[in-house]
Image (cartoon, helix red, strand yellow):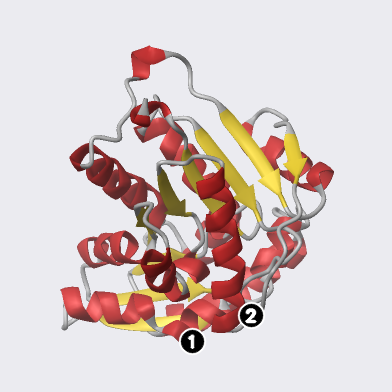
């Protein structure tokens, strides 16, 4: 049946597992095929052409594996390549930008939102445009944080290096008087303790994952793609382009179990 086919999720690495957790919570009947592009992580310093080429072969793989819906569990790809890849593939897709921007607009009380994101996401300006379209009075202050993804991928959460990097990147945003911080990368929730320590408990943190999965659930319902939770337990399959052992080790810390991970080679046709 169409409804029993899995959802496809992808990210540059383990960051998208924060989105997978929301799928497990909000879509408990859905099986998931997760792809981590660990051979090419981080995405944040890559060009738009690179991101489109990398995303194209991942969507091609996911479609070939029979997914019925794709969630871009990566802010950088959501900001840059989602619109292009929607034109190339018929499978329905959702990204993090629109749901995340809407959540940030709802959360702010003083109209000053900070965006912490990768270099490519900041350059793309998609979050800023989305928030301005939704609420022209909201001021958005963006800060690229290139050191955070490598720290998370290396398992360096909770270290002095992680706190130092978070403090460095948050300082310019806090100086602007923001009351809301939008986490513009799915790796950043792994650093939530450091972010709360530096930003203080009064700072509202917006993680686009929950809003994105809720949007996916709504669209899947309209398209009659939702699986029945009572039709059998969901299955989670994990694929990476890089080292499967490194991914499994990092995923175990977050998921609470060590997943079986398969390495697949996906050639990149061109940048």
- Mark sitting earlier along the chain (1/2): 2
- Of circles 1 and 2, which is in front? 2
For residue 72, above or below residue 50:
above
Say which quadrant the C terminus sits in: bottom right
- Residue for point 19% across, 79% down: 133
Which element type, helix, strand or loop, lies under badge 1? helix
Question: Where is residue 138 drawn, in percent x and y?
Answer: 22, 80
Closer to the camera, 193 or 131? 131
Q: CA distance from mark 1 to mark 2?
A: 11 Å
Which element type, helix, strand or loop, lies under badge 2? loop
Q: Residues within 10 Å of mark 2 (few under 14, many from 20)?
A: some
For residue 262, above or below residue 134:
above
For residue 164, above or below residue 151:
below
Say which quadrant the N terminus sits in: top left
Closer to the camera, 259 or 55? 55
The disc at residue 69 is none
Compared across the picture, whether 157 is left or right of 174 comes to right
Compared across the picture, whether 29 is left or right of 129 comes to right
> Taking the image as drawn, is residue 103 in sight?
yes
Question: Where is residue 22 drawn, in percent x and y?
Answer: 43, 40
Question: Where is residue 167 drawn, in percent x and y?
Answer: 60, 72
- Residue for point 55% across, 56% down: 60
Closer to the camera, 70 or 247? 70
Return the residue at label 1: 123
Return the residue at label 2: 46
């Amino acid at each position: 049946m169409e409804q029993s086919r899995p959802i496809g999720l992808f990210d540059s690495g383990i960051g998208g597992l924060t989105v997978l957790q929301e799928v497990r919570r909000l879509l408990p009947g859905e099986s998931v095929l997760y792809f981590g592009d660990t051979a090419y992580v981080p995405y944040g310093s890559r060009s738009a052409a690179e991101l489109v080429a990398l995303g194209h072969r991942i969507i091609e793989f996911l479609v070939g594996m029979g997914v019925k819906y794709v969630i871009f569990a990566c802010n950088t790809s959501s900001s840059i390549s989602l619109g292009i890849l929607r034109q190339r593939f018929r499978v329905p897709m959702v990204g993090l930008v629109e749901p995340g921007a809407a959540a940030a607009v709802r959360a702010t009380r003083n109209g000053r939102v900070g965006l912490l994101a990768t270099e490519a996401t900041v350059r793309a300006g998609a979050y800023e445009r989305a928030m301005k379209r939704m609420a022209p009075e909201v001021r958005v202050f963006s800060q690229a944080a290139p050191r955070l993804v490598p720290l998370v991928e290396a398992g360096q959460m909770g270290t002095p290096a992680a706190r130092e990097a978070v403090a460095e990147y948050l300082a310019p945003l806090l100086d602007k008087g923001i009351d809301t911080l939008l986490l513009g990368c799915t790796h950043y929730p792994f650093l939530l303790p450091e972010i709360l320590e530096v930003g203080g408990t009064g700072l509202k943190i917006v993680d686009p994952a929950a809003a994105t999965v809720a949007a996916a659930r709504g669209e899947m319902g309209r398209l009659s793609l939702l699986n029945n939770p009572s039709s059998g337990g969901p299955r989670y399959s994990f694929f990476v382009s890089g080292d499967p052992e490194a991914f499994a080790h990092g995923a175990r810390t977050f998921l609470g179990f060590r997943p079986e991970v398969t390495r697949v080679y996906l050639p990149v046709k061109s940048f």
